Amino acid sequence: MQIKLTGKVALFSDIHGNYLALKRITDLLMQDPPDIWISLGDTVGYFPDGELVLNHLRHLNCLCLQGNHEKMLLDGNYCGKDDHYRLERQKRLLSKN
C-alpha cells in the first residue's frame, strides 16, 4: 500500500492498552489537528484497555501498523512471557468487532 503524506502527520507507538495516555495525547493534538494519524504498532498489551484504545483509533480514522505485540496476540505465541505482556488477558477482553 502506498500513502501520500501531505500536511501534518501524527505518529505514535507503544500505547500498549493505555487508553488514558492515548486520550491525553490525542486531546492535545486536537488543538491543532493533524491531517493523518498513524500508529506504528504495539497498541495492545500490558494495560487492560486495548479495546478502548482500538475504538479510539478507529474514531480517529487512524492508520495502524502491526507491531510485535499485535503479532503475538494474533499468533497466540507470547514467547513464554505472557505474565509480563498480559496478551492472553487482553485477547479475552477484546470483542470480535
Image (cartoon, rainbow, N blue to C red):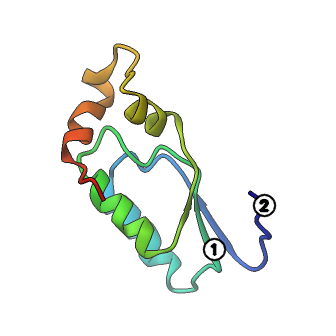
State which quadrant residue 91 falls in. top left
Residue 93 coordinates in the image, percent (x, y): 19, 47
Q: Is residue 68 left or right of residue 58?
A: right
Q: Amino acid at mark 1?
A: Ile
Residue holding disc 2: 2
> What residue sits 46% from the left and 72% below the top?
26
Q: Nearer the viewer's eye, disc 2 or disc 1?
A: 2
Give the answer, above or below, for where 43 lies relative to 61: above
Q: CA distance from mark 2 to mark 1?
A: 14 Å
Label 2: element kind:
loop
Label 1: element kind:
strand
Residue holding disc 1: 36
| Mark nearer the N terminus (2 vs 1) | 2
Give the answer, above or below, for where 18 lies relative to 31: above
> What residue sits 31% from the left and 38% below the top?
46
> What residue sits 40% from the left and 16% below the top?
79
Give the answer, above or below, for where 68 lies relative to 47: above
In the picture, the quarter occupied by the N terminus is bottom right
Q: Identify which residue, 61 or 12, lies in the foreground.
A: 61
Q: Identify which residue, 86 or 3, lies in the foreground.
A: 3
Name the residue furthest front. Answer: 96
**In contact (CB < 8 Å): disc 2 and disc 1:** no
Q: Is residue 58 left or right of residue 19?
A: right
The crowding category of the residue bearing disc 1, from other C-alpha atoms within 10 Å (few below 14, some 14 to 19, many at least 20), is: some
Residue 76 coordinates in the image, percent (x, y): 36, 26
Q: Identify which residue, 15 or 87, lies in the foreground.
A: 87
In the picture, the quarter occupied by the C terminus is bottom left
Q: Amino acid at mark 2?
A: Gln
